[in-house]
Image: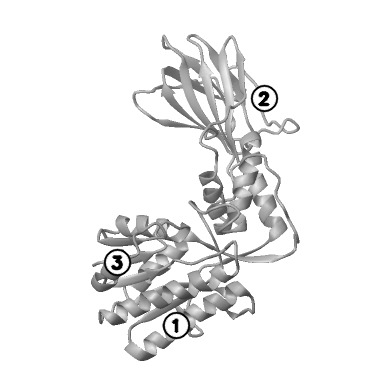
Amino acid sequence: MNILVTGAKGFVGKNLIAELRNKGYNDIFEFSRESDPSLLEKYTKDCDFVFHLAGVNRPKDVNEFMEGNFGLTSQLLELLKKHGNKAPVLITSSIQADKDNPYGRSKKAGEDLLLNYYKETDVKVYIYRLPNLFGKWSRPNYNTVVATYCHNIARDMDIQINNPDAELTLCYIDDVLEEFLRALEGHPTIQDDYCVVPTTHKIKLGDLANVIKSFKDSRGNLSIPNMKDALTKKLYSTYLSFLPENKFSYDLKMNCDHRGSFTEFIRTLDRGQVSINVSKPGITKGNHWHHTKNEKFLVVSGEGLIRFRKIDSEEIIEYRVNGDRLQVVDIPTGYTHSIVNIGEKDLVTVMWVNECFDPGKPDTYYLEV
């Protein structure tokens, strides 16, 4: 199947082409502003489906709106008619198309061209009035406020919030791609005479800014965003794609002493925290018990001995663990416990606890095993 994608170097085009290739579509005609204009003649002759994504969002001159959003569409459709090509055509319009502004009028003109083309040729056409899109590979100060906020906040740059209570309708690029693939297979989602991406999200501008700022803060407070919230999950993935390439990593606070180190890695509101414990050879750590707090230990390097004793018993229970055989050991409540490095190198243990440490209520009581 030969697939023509106009606007191939743009935000949606780059993501779409990558996903088409993921799905096994390898015969893709990529057309962009940098392409030789004569290629469009060949592509419109041989294509089996058209994704017409090219357009103008923020021109230097408002006249470019009509030229970019109407002129190229007209040229594309005329070439398809010239070659008698009945390939379905999908066009990306905007929710602005019903508004009386230069951008909206240009998008509406493009829609009308496609509707007339359908009436003349009976070729399948799919008109998508898209809201504000966001996701990886979008451009700050061009595609969406999400891109601008992610880019600036990741670089400690100021952001502008004109009206914190202004509500945005956002649509994530992966949801767009899923819908476009359905259209490619002949099953678009139709609503009120237009095609739509069924999954969208609403958020106030001020809330959007605060959520993205929290992603930056999470490196310091070790928190993980609420991945149960679909919009937060998508925004966080987008934010990470805007990290400066020399800022992918960040330091953790290592609490070091002669015994080794203890370093908190991740803290969550409802799933506890993860820490990394390093013990030097011969060192014993622990010797305490908990009423409610519970843990999981996973030794990933070295040799260790985890010892347990129920606080009202003399019986000692032992588990030998090592990094050559990854094995999780649960730490039940009511058992005092310790971990001893019985090897000749550092003992490295990943420790999960069901609640973040609260110095006001540590639920930790010293008692030797």
Dividing the picture into quadrants, the one containing residue 294 is: top right
Question: Residue at position x 36%, y 78% from top?
Answer: 77
Q: Nearer the viewer, residue 349 or 367?
A: 349
- Sooner in the amino-acid sequence: mark 1 or mark 3: 3
Q: Give the number of the mark in front: 2 or 3.
A: 3
Q: Which residue is mark 3?
A: 3
Residue 105, numbered circle: none
Residue 365, numbered circle: 2
| Quadrant placement of the C terminus | top right
* Label 3 residue SS: strand
Q: Residue furthest bottom?
A: 119
Measured from the top left, where is residue 264 in percent x and y? 59, 29
- In the shown orientation, is residue 360 left or right of residue 307? right
Q: Which residue is mark 1?
A: 113
Q: Nearer the viewer, residue 352 or 99?
A: 99
Measured from the top left, where is residue 252 in percent x and y? 59, 27
Q: Vertically, is 80 above or below 255?
A: below
Tag 2: residue type? Answer: Tyr
Q: Nearer the viewer, residue 288 or 10?
A: 10
Q: Give the number of the mark in front: 1 or 3.
A: 1
- In the shown orientation, is residue 63 left or right of residue 211? left
* Real-space CA distance between mark 2 and mark 1, rounded to the nearest whole angstrom: 75 Å
Q: Vertically, is 109 above or below 55?
A: below
